[in-house]
Amino acid sequence: MFNFLKKILKKQYPEDLFKITITENLVKIEHPTRKTEQINWDDIEEIKLINTDTGPVEPDVWLALLGKDSGCLIPHGSNGYEDIYNTVSQYDKFNFENVIESMTCVENKEFLLWIK
């Protein structure tokens, strides 16, 4: 009976629906209702944090890994976000000030963190 109640009462967040795959070569994001996105680590040309006003129904902060022909959006709070962030935040000239600004922002706004 307890497990049944636990499943019913467990709150699911929108970020929980994203499946993130991280390999030595790429990052891939899958979601039941969105197109699968992926980017090779070597193809990343720009990294941003994108803040939106769609929370809490949808993720409201996204880490964007962008390349010339590919890219992916990783929702803050999803399983795997921290691993990706920890990797890209080691890039030379990564802008930590914009990370702080993003985390204190309540507007729809983009914050450039790194550019190749």
Image (cartoon, rainbow, N blue to C red):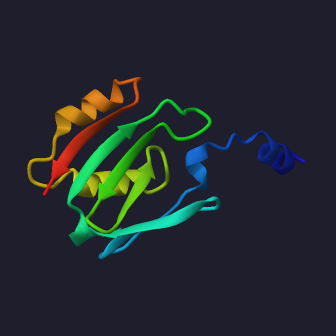
Front-most of 103 and 1? 103
Q: Is residue 42 left or right of residue 56?
A: left
Instruction: Relative to 36, say whether 79 is above or below.
Output: above
**Quadrant occupied by the C terminus:** bottom left
- Name, please, the residue furthest toward the right: 1
Q: Quadrant of residue 37?
A: bottom left
Q: Residue at x 86, y 49 (%)?
A: 4
Q: Is residue 8 left or right of residue 88?
A: right
Front-most of 14 and 6? 14
Q: Quadrant of residue 24?
A: bottom left
Q: Position of residue 53 (x, y in %)?
A: 49, 29
The answer to whether residue 75 is visible is yes
Q: Residue at x 26, y 36 (%)?
A: 99
Q: Quadrant of residue 54?
A: top right
- Name, please, the residue furthest toward the front: 69
- Name, please, the residue furthest toward the left: 93
Instruction: Relative to 14, say whether 24 is above or below.
Output: below
The answer to whether residue 30 is visible is no
Q: Position of residue 75 (x, y in %)?
A: 46, 48
Q: Position of residue 1 (x, y in %)?
A: 90, 48
> How many numbered discs, if any?
0
Q: Position of residue 86 (x, y in %)?
A: 28, 53
Instruction: Relative to 45, say whether 89 is above or below.
Output: above
